Image: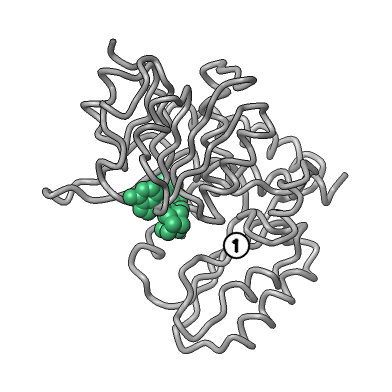
Protein backbone atom coordinates (compact mmCIF):
# COMPACT_ATOMS: atom_id res chain seq x y z
CA UNK A 1 0.00 0.00 0.00
CA UNK A 2 1.17 3.53 -0.70
CA UNK A 3 -0.43 6.07 1.57
CA UNK A 4 -2.40 8.94 0.16
CA UNK A 5 -0.97 12.35 0.96
CA UNK A 6 -2.89 14.85 3.03
CA UNK A 7 -1.71 18.00 1.33
CA UNK A 8 -1.43 20.81 3.89
CA UNK A 9 -0.56 23.36 1.23
CA UNK A 10 -3.71 22.69 -0.79
CA UNK A 11 -5.99 22.50 2.25
CA UNK A 12 -4.56 25.65 3.80
CA UNK A 13 -5.06 27.47 0.51
CA UNK A 14 -8.72 26.49 0.56
CA UNK A 15 -9.07 27.64 4.17
CA UNK A 16 -7.32 30.93 3.43
CA UNK A 17 -9.80 31.45 0.59
CA UNK A 18 -12.68 30.95 3.03
CA UNK A 19 -11.07 33.38 5.48
CA UNK A 20 -10.71 35.97 2.72
CA UNK A 21 -14.38 35.55 1.87
CA UNK A 22 -15.54 35.95 5.49
CA UNK A 23 -13.17 38.88 5.99
CA UNK A 24 -14.67 40.64 2.98
CA UNK A 25 -18.13 40.17 4.52
CA UNK A 26 -16.94 41.78 7.76
CA UNK A 27 -15.32 44.65 5.90
CA UNK A 28 -18.60 45.25 4.07
CA UNK A 29 -20.07 45.84 7.54
CA UNK A 30 -17.27 48.32 8.33
CA UNK A 31 -15.34 45.86 10.50
CA UNK A 32 -11.62 45.34 9.86
CA UNK A 33 -10.32 42.15 11.54
CA UNK A 34 -7.01 43.01 13.16
CA UNK A 35 -4.22 40.94 14.65
CA UNK A 36 -1.42 42.39 16.79
CA UNK A 37 1.78 40.38 16.85
CA UNK A 38 4.48 41.13 19.39
CA UNK A 39 8.04 39.98 18.82
CA UNK A 40 10.59 40.51 21.57
CA UNK A 41 14.25 39.95 20.72
CA UNK A 42 16.05 38.76 17.62
CA UNK A 43 15.40 35.01 17.47
CA UNK A 44 15.91 34.21 13.75
CA UNK A 45 13.17 31.55 13.53
CA UNK A 46 10.71 33.86 15.29
CA UNK A 47 11.49 36.60 12.79
CA UNK A 48 10.62 34.25 9.93
CA UNK A 49 7.44 32.98 11.64
CA UNK A 50 6.14 36.47 12.42
CA UNK A 51 6.85 37.63 8.88
CA UNK A 52 4.81 34.70 7.55
CA UNK A 53 1.96 35.57 9.90
CA UNK A 54 1.90 39.18 8.69
CA UNK A 55 2.03 38.15 5.02
CA UNK A 56 -0.66 35.47 5.44
CA UNK A 57 -2.91 38.03 7.12
CA UNK A 58 -2.39 40.63 4.43
CA UNK A 59 -3.16 38.07 1.73
CA UNK A 60 -6.55 37.31 3.27
CA UNK A 61 -7.50 40.90 4.07
CA UNK A 62 -6.78 40.74 7.81
CA UNK A 63 -4.81 43.68 9.19
CA UNK A 64 -1.76 42.40 11.04
CA UNK A 65 0.62 44.68 12.90
CA UNK A 66 4.03 43.44 13.93
CA UNK A 67 5.48 45.23 16.94
CA UNK A 68 9.16 44.53 17.47
CA UNK A 69 10.89 45.18 20.77
CA UNK A 70 14.49 44.66 21.87
CA UNK A 71 15.39 41.67 24.05
CA UNK A 72 16.10 44.18 26.81
CA UNK A 73 12.40 45.07 27.08
CA UNK A 74 11.21 44.52 30.64
CA UNK A 75 8.42 42.15 31.55
CA UNK A 76 6.42 45.06 32.98
CA UNK A 77 6.71 47.00 29.74
CA UNK A 78 5.50 43.98 27.79
CA UNK A 79 2.57 43.39 30.14
CA UNK A 80 1.60 47.07 29.90
CA UNK A 81 1.64 46.86 26.10
CA UNK A 82 -0.57 43.76 26.15
CA UNK A 83 -3.04 45.47 28.50
CA UNK A 84 -3.26 48.42 26.11
CA UNK A 85 -3.99 46.05 23.21
CA UNK A 86 -6.54 44.18 25.36
CA UNK A 87 -8.42 47.45 25.83
CA UNK A 88 -8.28 48.47 22.16
CA UNK A 89 -11.58 47.54 20.47
CA UNK A 90 -9.92 47.74 17.05
CA UNK A 91 -7.60 44.84 17.94
CA UNK A 92 -9.28 41.42 17.78
CA UNK A 93 -6.35 39.07 18.20
CA UNK A 94 -3.09 39.31 20.16
CA UNK A 95 -0.17 36.98 19.64
CA UNK A 96 3.10 37.11 21.54
CA UNK A 97 5.69 35.15 19.60
CA UNK A 98 7.45 32.50 21.68
CA UNK A 99 10.10 31.89 22.88
CA UNK A 100 10.53 35.05 24.92
CA UNK A 101 13.90 36.20 26.25
CA UNK A 102 15.04 34.23 29.30
CA UNK A 103 14.30 37.03 31.79
CA UNK A 104 10.61 36.95 30.92
CA UNK A 105 7.93 34.71 32.38
CA UNK A 106 6.07 33.40 29.33
CA UNK A 107 3.27 31.98 31.44
CA UNK A 108 2.48 35.35 32.99
CA UNK A 109 2.73 37.05 29.60
CA UNK A 110 0.25 34.64 28.01
CA UNK A 111 -2.13 34.89 30.97
CA UNK A 112 -2.18 38.69 30.52
CA UNK A 113 -3.69 38.41 27.03
CA UNK A 114 -7.47 38.82 27.18
CA UNK A 115 -8.97 35.34 26.58
CA UNK A 116 -11.30 36.85 23.94
CA UNK A 117 -8.19 37.86 21.95
CA UNK A 118 -6.10 34.73 22.60
CA UNK A 119 -5.89 33.61 18.97
CA UNK A 120 -2.93 31.30 19.69
CA UNK A 121 -5.17 29.41 22.11
CA UNK A 122 -2.42 29.21 24.75
CA UNK A 123 -4.25 31.05 27.59
CA UNK A 124 -5.32 28.89 30.50
CA UNK A 125 -8.93 29.94 29.80
CA UNK A 126 -8.62 28.58 26.25
CA UNK A 127 -7.10 25.35 27.57
CA UNK A 128 -9.93 25.07 30.12
CA UNK A 129 -12.59 25.69 27.50
CA UNK A 130 -11.15 22.92 25.33
CA UNK A 131 -10.98 20.62 28.34
CA UNK A 132 -14.70 21.01 29.11
CA UNK A 133 -15.81 21.30 25.48
CA UNK A 134 -16.89 24.93 25.57
CA UNK A 135 -16.27 27.54 22.88
CA UNK A 136 -12.81 29.08 23.06
CA UNK A 137 -9.76 29.23 20.84
CA UNK A 138 -8.09 25.97 19.90
CA UNK A 139 -4.29 26.02 19.56
CA UNK A 140 -3.53 26.35 15.86
CA UNK A 141 -1.37 23.25 15.32
CA UNK A 142 -3.70 20.57 16.70
CA UNK A 143 -6.67 22.49 15.27
CA UNK A 144 -4.98 22.23 11.85
CA UNK A 145 -4.47 18.48 12.37
CA UNK A 146 -8.19 18.09 13.08
CA UNK A 147 -8.98 19.98 9.87
CA UNK A 148 -6.71 17.58 7.98
CA UNK A 149 -8.63 14.59 9.35
CA UNK A 150 -11.91 16.32 8.49
CA UNK A 151 -10.66 16.98 4.96
CA UNK A 152 -10.36 13.26 4.22
CA UNK A 153 -13.79 12.61 5.72
CA UNK A 154 -12.29 10.55 8.52
CA UNK A 155 -14.79 9.57 11.22
CA UNK A 156 -12.91 9.36 14.50
CA UNK A 157 -15.75 7.80 16.46
CA UNK A 158 -14.53 4.61 18.07
CA UNK A 159 -11.11 4.83 16.44
CA UNK A 160 -7.94 4.44 18.48
CA UNK A 161 -5.76 7.55 18.25
CA UNK A 162 -2.24 7.59 19.64
CA UNK A 163 -0.67 10.99 20.26
CA UNK A 164 3.09 10.98 20.76
CA UNK A 165 4.01 14.06 22.80
CA UNK A 166 2.22 15.85 25.64
CA UNK A 167 3.18 19.50 25.34
CA UNK A 168 0.60 22.12 26.29
CA UNK A 169 0.58 23.57 22.78
CA UNK A 170 0.42 20.39 20.69
CA UNK A 171 0.18 16.97 22.34
CA UNK A 172 -2.31 17.62 25.14
CA UNK A 173 -4.76 19.78 23.17
CA UNK A 174 -4.49 17.30 20.26
CA UNK A 175 -5.52 14.48 22.56
CA UNK A 176 -8.47 16.49 23.89
CA UNK A 177 -9.67 17.36 20.39
CA UNK A 178 -9.50 13.72 19.31
CA UNK A 179 -11.37 12.74 22.46
CA UNK A 180 -14.02 15.35 21.75
CA UNK A 181 -14.41 13.75 18.31
CA UNK A 182 -15.10 10.42 20.09
CA UNK A 183 -11.80 8.68 19.44
CA UNK A 184 -10.27 6.48 22.12
CA UNK A 185 -7.04 8.29 22.88
CA UNK A 186 -3.67 7.17 24.16
CA UNK A 187 -1.07 9.81 25.03
CA UNK A 188 2.59 8.81 24.85
CA UNK A 189 5.66 10.67 26.07
CA UNK A 190 9.32 10.14 26.90
CA UNK A 191 8.41 7.84 29.77
CA UNK A 192 6.17 5.57 27.70
CA UNK A 193 7.23 1.93 27.74
CA UNK A 194 7.07 0.16 24.39
CA UNK A 195 5.83 2.99 22.21
CA UNK A 196 5.72 0.67 19.19
CA UNK A 197 3.26 -1.70 20.87
CA UNK A 198 0.86 1.22 21.30
CA UNK A 199 1.31 2.83 17.89
CA UNK A 200 0.80 -0.55 16.20
CA UNK A 201 -2.74 -0.61 17.61
CA UNK A 202 -3.53 2.90 16.39
CA UNK A 203 -5.93 3.86 13.62
CA UNK A 204 -4.51 7.38 13.85
CA UNK A 205 -1.04 8.38 15.00
CA UNK A 206 -0.06 11.98 15.64
CA UNK A 207 3.67 12.43 16.15
CA UNK A 208 4.56 15.66 17.99
CA UNK A 209 7.96 15.02 19.48
CA UNK A 210 10.71 16.92 17.70
CA UNK A 211 12.95 13.93 16.95
CA UNK A 212 13.56 12.28 13.60
CA UNK A 213 12.36 8.74 12.97
CA UNK A 214 10.31 8.48 16.15
CA UNK A 215 7.78 6.61 14.03
CA UNK A 216 9.01 3.97 11.62
CA UNK A 217 7.18 1.59 9.30
CA UNK A 218 7.30 -1.36 11.73
CA UNK A 219 5.40 0.78 14.29
CA UNK A 220 2.40 1.50 12.06
CA UNK A 221 -0.77 -0.54 11.48
CA UNK A 222 -1.47 -0.99 7.75
CA UNK A 223 -3.92 1.65 6.56
CA UNK A 224 -3.49 3.95 9.58
CA UNK A 225 -3.62 7.73 9.30
CA UNK A 226 -0.29 9.29 10.23
CA UNK A 227 0.01 12.98 11.05
CA UNK A 228 3.51 14.32 11.41
CA UNK A 229 3.75 17.51 13.48
CA UNK A 230 7.51 17.35 14.05
CA UNK A 231 9.93 19.83 12.55
CA UNK A 232 13.50 18.68 12.44
CA UNK A 233 16.52 18.89 10.16
CA UNK A 234 18.01 15.85 8.47
CA UNK A 235 21.74 15.29 8.01
CA UNK A 236 21.68 17.39 4.85
CA UNK A 237 19.98 20.23 6.76
CA UNK A 238 16.64 19.64 5.03
CA UNK A 239 13.39 20.10 6.94
CA UNK A 240 11.87 16.78 8.02
CA UNK A 241 9.33 15.51 10.50
CA UNK A 242 9.26 12.91 13.26
CA UNK A 243 8.10 10.20 10.90
CA UNK A 244 10.28 8.08 8.61
CA UNK A 245 8.23 9.32 5.67
CA UNK A 246 9.41 6.94 2.95
CA UNK A 247 9.11 3.86 5.15
CA UNK A 248 5.77 4.75 6.73
CA UNK A 249 4.09 5.83 3.50
CA UNK A 250 4.41 2.24 2.28
CA UNK A 251 2.29 1.01 5.21
CA UNK A 252 -0.06 3.83 6.16
CA UNK A 253 -3.35 4.69 4.48
CA UNK A 254 -2.88 8.44 4.78
CA UNK A 255 0.15 10.52 5.67
CA UNK A 256 1.06 14.19 6.01
CA UNK A 257 4.35 15.32 4.45
CA UNK A 258 6.97 17.61 6.00
CA UNK A 259 7.24 20.24 4.65
CA UNK A 260 3.80 20.94 3.20
CA UNK A 261 1.72 19.23 5.87
CA UNK A 262 0.91 20.49 9.35
CA UNK A 263 3.05 23.64 9.03
CA UNK A 264 0.85 25.51 6.53
CA UNK A 265 -2.24 24.35 8.42
CA UNK A 266 -0.95 25.90 11.64
CA UNK A 267 -0.56 29.20 9.81
CA UNK A 268 -4.04 28.95 8.30
CA UNK A 269 -5.70 28.24 11.65
CA UNK A 270 -4.26 31.41 13.14
CA UNK A 271 -6.16 33.32 10.48
CA UNK A 272 -9.32 31.35 11.27
CA UNK A 273 -8.97 32.10 14.99
CA UNK A 274 -8.41 35.80 14.31
CA UNK A 275 -11.47 35.92 12.13
CA UNK A 276 -13.45 34.03 14.75
CA UNK A 277 -12.33 36.50 17.43
CA UNK A 278 -13.48 39.37 15.22
CA UNK A 279 -16.83 37.79 14.50
CA UNK A 280 -17.44 37.08 18.19
CA UNK A 281 -16.48 40.65 19.16
CA UNK A 282 -18.77 42.04 16.47
CA UNK A 283 -21.80 39.76 17.00
P1 LIG B 1 7.96 19.69 23.21
O1 LIG B 1 7.31 20.69 24.10
O2 LIG B 1 9.44 19.53 23.24
O3 LIG B 1 7.29 18.26 23.51
C1 LIG B 1 7.80 17.11 22.95
C2 LIG B 1 7.08 15.92 23.55
O4 LIG B 1 7.65 14.74 23.02
C3 LIG B 1 7.19 15.80 25.06
O5 LIG B 1 5.92 15.55 25.62
C4 LIG B 1 8.13 14.63 25.27
O6 LIG B 1 7.86 13.87 26.42
C5 LIG B 1 7.85 13.80 24.06
N1 LIG B 1 8.96 12.92 23.73
C6 LIG B 1 10.27 13.22 23.67
N2 LIG B 1 10.99 12.15 23.30
C7 LIG B 1 10.11 11.14 23.13
C8 LIG B 1 10.22 9.78 22.76
N3 LIG B 1 11.41 9.24 22.46
N4 LIG B 1 9.11 9.03 22.69
C9 LIG B 1 7.90 9.56 22.97
N5 LIG B 1 7.73 10.85 23.33
C10 LIG B 1 8.82 11.62 23.41
O7 LIG B 1 7.59 19.95 21.70
P2 LIG B 1 6.28 20.59 21.01
O8 LIG B 1 6.28 22.06 21.19
O9 LIG B 1 5.08 19.81 21.39
O10 LIG B 1 6.63 20.31 19.48
C11 LIG B 1 6.84 18.98 19.01
C12 LIG B 1 7.37 19.04 17.59
O11 LIG B 1 6.39 19.66 16.76
C13 LIG B 1 8.64 19.87 17.41
O12 LIG B 1 9.41 19.32 16.38
C14 LIG B 1 8.12 21.22 16.97
O13 LIG B 1 9.07 21.95 16.21
C15 LIG B 1 6.98 20.78 16.11
N6 LIG B 1 5.92 21.78 15.93
C16 LIG B 1 5.49 21.97 14.68
C17 LIG B 1 4.50 22.88 14.43
C18 LIG B 1 4.03 23.06 13.03
O14 LIG B 1 3.33 24.02 12.77
N7 LIG B 1 4.36 22.15 12.12
C19 LIG B 1 3.94 23.60 15.48
C20 LIG B 1 4.35 23.35 16.78
C21 LIG B 1 5.36 22.42 16.99
P3 LIG B 1 8.01 14.44 27.92
O15 LIG B 1 6.80 15.29 28.15
O16 LIG B 1 8.03 13.21 28.76
O17 LIG B 1 9.28 15.21 27.95
Q: How is the image coloured?
A: one colour
Q: Quadrant of the C terminus?
A: top right
- Percent across and percent down for residue 131 are 72, 47
Q: Is residue 254 above or below residue 197?
A: above
Closer to us: 108 or 82? 108
> Image quarter for residue 7?
top left
> Image quarter for residue 261?
top left
Q: Is residue 59 above or below residue 43?
A: above
Residue at left 37%, top 32%?
A: 197
The residue identified by callout 1 is 95
- Percent across and percent down for residue 61 are 61, 44
- Percent across and percent down for residue 246 are 21, 27
Closer to us: 44 or 25? 44
Closer to us: 94 or 65? 94
Farthest left residue in view: 236
Residue 209 visible somewhere in the drawing: no
Amino acid sequence: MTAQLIDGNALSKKIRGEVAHRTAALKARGIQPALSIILVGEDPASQVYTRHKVNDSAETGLAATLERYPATMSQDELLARIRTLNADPKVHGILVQLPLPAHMDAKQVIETIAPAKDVDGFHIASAGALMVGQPGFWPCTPYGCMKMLESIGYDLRGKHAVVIGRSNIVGKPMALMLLQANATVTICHSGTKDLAALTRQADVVVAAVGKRNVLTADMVKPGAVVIDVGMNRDDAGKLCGDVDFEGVRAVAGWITPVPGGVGPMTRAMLLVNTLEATERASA
